[in-house]
Amino acid sequence: MILRRINIRMSGLGGQGAVTAAHVMAMAASKDGKFAISNPFFGAEKRMAPAESYCRIGLRKIYDRGELVFPDVIQVFHPQVITMGKSYTMPFYSGIKEGGLVIINTDMPLLSDEDVKRLKDLNVSVFNIPGTNIALEIAGTELATNMTMIGSVAGITKCVSMNGLDLALQERFGKKFVASGGTATLDEAIKKKFAKKEMLLKKNLDTVARSYEIAAEWAEKNHVELMVGEATAA
C-alpha cells in the first residue's frame, strides 16, 4: 500500500523516549524533503506512566496535529501497554486503519487470541521486535530502546531514510537542543551514559541501523508494503 501520508502513533511509558522518537522521525522526514509534524500526549510526567506521541509524515503540507485517532501504524514501546492496559486507548490498537501495521517491543507473543483475530480481520500486520534487548546489546543501555523503534518503523515503511535519520540524530544529540520537562531530563540521562557525544551518536545510529535491517528483512519476507509515495497509474 502506497500512501501520500503516514500517521504513526507511539504508545509507551514515561522515560522510554517516545516523545523523542516522534521528534527524530519528523526531523528525519524534513531532512528527506518531506513534510512532518510530531507532538506528544501524556498526563503526569513520571517514569512508567502512560505516554503517547504522534508523528505525521507526508508529501504535502500537514495542517492537523494533536491526538491521532486513526493511525496507519501503532508502535508499542513497552509490554505493559498491552499486558496492564497502560494506554490512552483500549484496546491499544483502537482506531488502527485497515491494512495497517503494529510494531511491538517484545521478545515473546503478547496478543490474545481475540486481539490476533481482530487485527487479522482488519488485515493489520504485526511485527514483534526485541527492541530493549537490541538496545542493550548495541548501545549498552535500555534508554536506546526508542532508537530500535525508530529503526523498525523506518525499515518497514521507508517513510524516512537512514541518511535522514543520521542527520536528525546529529541535530538532536550533537548540538544544543532545547527540550522541556521530562524530555530534557531523559536527553541528559542518555548523554551521561557516554563520555563523548560522538560515541552517543554512533551507538544510537548503530542501534537504529540494526533494527532497520531486521525490520526491512521481515517486511520483505512477509510481503508487507506500507510506504509513503505517489501512487502510480495502472
Image: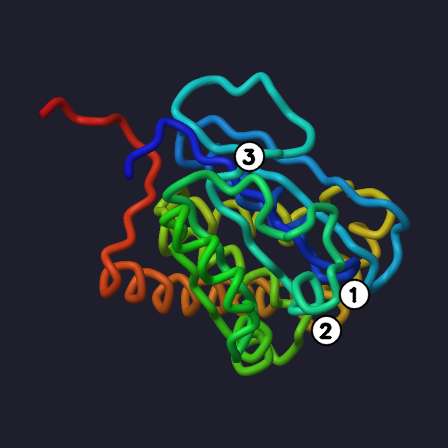
| Residue at figure coordinates x 84%, y 52% from the top left | 182
Residue occupying image coordinates x 88% and y 51%: 45
The kind of residue tagged 1 is Ala
Quadrant containing the N terminus is: top left
CA separation, marks 2 and 1?
7 Å
Q: Report helix, strand or loop for mark 1.
A: helix
Mark 3 lies on residue: 70
In the picture, measured across the screen, residue 167 lies left or right of residue 15, that is left
Q: Secondary structure at mark 2?
A: loop
Q: Position of residue 88 (x, y in %)?
A: 74, 47
Which badge, 3 or 2, comes first in the chain's sequence? Answer: 3
Residue type at mark 3?
Phe
Does 49 sit above or below residue 195? above
Vertically, is 227 above or below 213?
above
What's under tag 2, amino acid-wise?
Answer: Lys
Instruction: Give residue 38's position: percent from left, percent from top.
Output: 62, 35
Element class at badge 3:
loop
Q: Residues within 10 Å of mark 3 (few under 14, many from 20)?
A: some
Q: Quadrant of the C terminus?
A: top left
Between 155 and 205, the one nearer to me in the picture = 155
Residue linked to disc 1: 189
- Considering depth in this image, is 34 or 76 the residue closer to the camera? 76
At a point 53% along the width and 38% down the height, the residue shown is 71
Question: In which image quadrant can residue 143 be found?
Answer: bottom right
All told, the count of numbered labels is 3
Identify the residue under disc 2.
193
Instruction: Measure how far apart labels 3 and 2 are at the Cα level.
Output: 37 Å
Mark 2 and mark 1 residues within 8 Å of each other at the beta carbon: yes
**Relative to 173, is 28 on the left or the right?**
left
**Foreground tag (3 vs 2):** 3
The tag on residue 217 is none
Q: Is residue 157 left or right of residue 66?
A: left
